[in-house]
Image (spheres, helix red, strand yellow):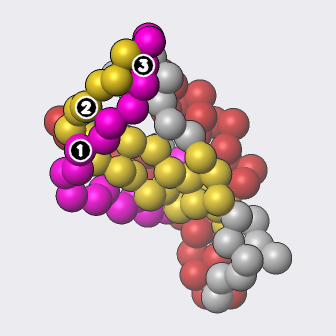
Amino acid sequence: MTDLVIVLTTAADQQADELARTLVDERLAACVNVHAAMTSTYRWNGRAVTEPERQLVIKTRRSRLPDLERRLNELHSYELPELIVLSPESASDAYASWISQETTP
């Protein structure tokens, strides 16, 4: 078992890289992968919407989640940012240690 968690979120194309950099600079994430542009279709305020987005895969520690969520809500352009937390079954000791080191304030 590890303290490492993976957080998924999406962002508007023009905001994704800035969000990633800020989360790493503030040590809320050790690494953020910003995936290529994609199209998302979802229901919002009673209607179907299709928008360009990018997915962010955020590697952090469970103990950093409250601060990460708070900051994501402050920075994000969406009224309701996606925040899905995945717990890996395992990770290499070296990688988990690096995540811990890089997310220590």
Amino acid type of disc 3? Trp
Looking at the image, tell me whether mark 1 or mark 2 is earlier in sequence order.
Answer: 1
- Mark 1, secondary structure of its residue: strand
Position of 7 compared to 35: left or right? right
Seen from the viewer's position, the closer of residues 91 and 52 is 52
Kind of residue sitting beneath label 1: Thr
Q: Position of residue 64 (x, y in %)?
A: 67, 47
Q: Is residue 32 above or below residue 23?
A: below
Residue 104: percent from left, percent from top: 63, 56
Residue 87: image quadrant is: bottom right
Looking at this view, name the residue that lies furthest to the top: 45
> How far apart are labels 3 and 1 at the CA level?
15 Å
Q: Which mark is residue 12?
A: none
Q: Residues within 10 Å of mark 1 (few under 14, many from 20)?
A: few
**Residue 45 coordinates in the image, percent (x, y):** 44, 11
Q: Which residue is mark 2?
A: 50
Labelled disc at residue 44: 3
Determine the CA span between mark 1 and mark 2: 7 Å
